[in-house]
Image (spheres, rainbow, N blue to C red):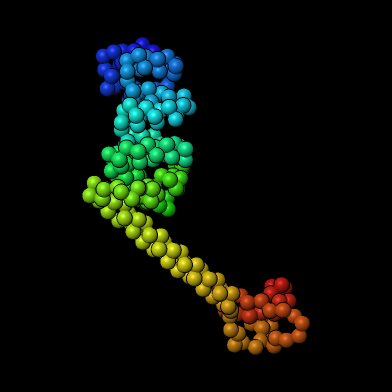
Amino acid sequence: MQMVELFAEYDPMGLLPFLRASERYPLEEALAVCQRKGLREEVAYLLGRAGRVADALRILLEEVGDVGRAVDFASETQDPQLWETLVSFVLQHSHLLVPLLDHLDALESKRLRAFGSESQQPQPPPIATPAHVLRLLPGETPLPRIAVSVQRVLDSLRLSADLHEACSKISSAEMVSQKEACIHRSNRGTGLSCQRCALCGAPFGGAGGIVIVGRTVWHQRCHRAS
């Protein structure tokens, strides 16, 4: 706590990295210090750690006014209620629409780059996508203000569609290849031109079986006896 108090007093810019890097401080006491000093981002971080995610998001949106940090915060848990609160707030404050679309597009691009890799990150709900936000826009939204962001979103959607189509084709081709290989293995056999046992010279026939050894064919009884 002495470090928390020293950072808050003499180096407020260094406090948030310290809070993230260390958990060896009493959460409620650190929260009280940050509230007393008016350090809103730090308060939001500590509220999130305490499980008060709705309060943390409200501070980032209403008091800090940083949509980017709010998007990063919501993406850590991908809680649909948090995303709904975030999107609803931005739709009521149209000047925040462009940064929201830009940050959502950046998250979507990052997710596409990681497509197919094993990831433990929670997946975003449908509301946390640029396409969904665009569908919610009021009809009177001025287009020139968001045109560039909308174009980026459309380009990302086109890239996503092309990627899924390419992966589907690759998957189908792989499946056909595996089926053909399976059929080939099932139909594979060895043609026998010889009519006599390579060991005893007697012709094949009767109830006795045969054994193929390399390129030679033996009676089963001869092979067993050898």
Residue found at x 33% / y 59%: 158
Decide if residue 162 is in sight here.
yes
Position of 119 compared to 216: left or right? left
Residue that sits furthest to the top in the current view = 2
Determine which quarter of the picture holds residue 45: top left
Between 43 and 222, the one lying in front of the other is 43
Measuring from the top left, give residue 72's x and y in whole percent: 36, 36
Measuring from the top left, give residue 221's x and y in whole percent: 73, 76
Position of 21 relative to 116 (above/below): above
Between 62 and 120, the one lying in front of the other is 62
Residue that sits furthest to the front in the current view = 140
Between 86 and 110, the one lying in front of the other is 86
Decide if residue 114 is in sight here.
no
Residue found at x 75% / y 80%: 208
Determine which quarter of the picture holds residue 200: bottom right
Measuring from the top left, give residue 74's x and y in whole percent: 41, 36
Residue found at x 76% / y 85%: 206
Residue that sits furthest to the right in the current view = 207
Report the number of discs: 0
Position of 42 compared to 144: left or right? right
Between 55 and 207, the one lying in front of the other is 55
Measuring from the top left, give residue 143's x and y in whole percent: 26, 50
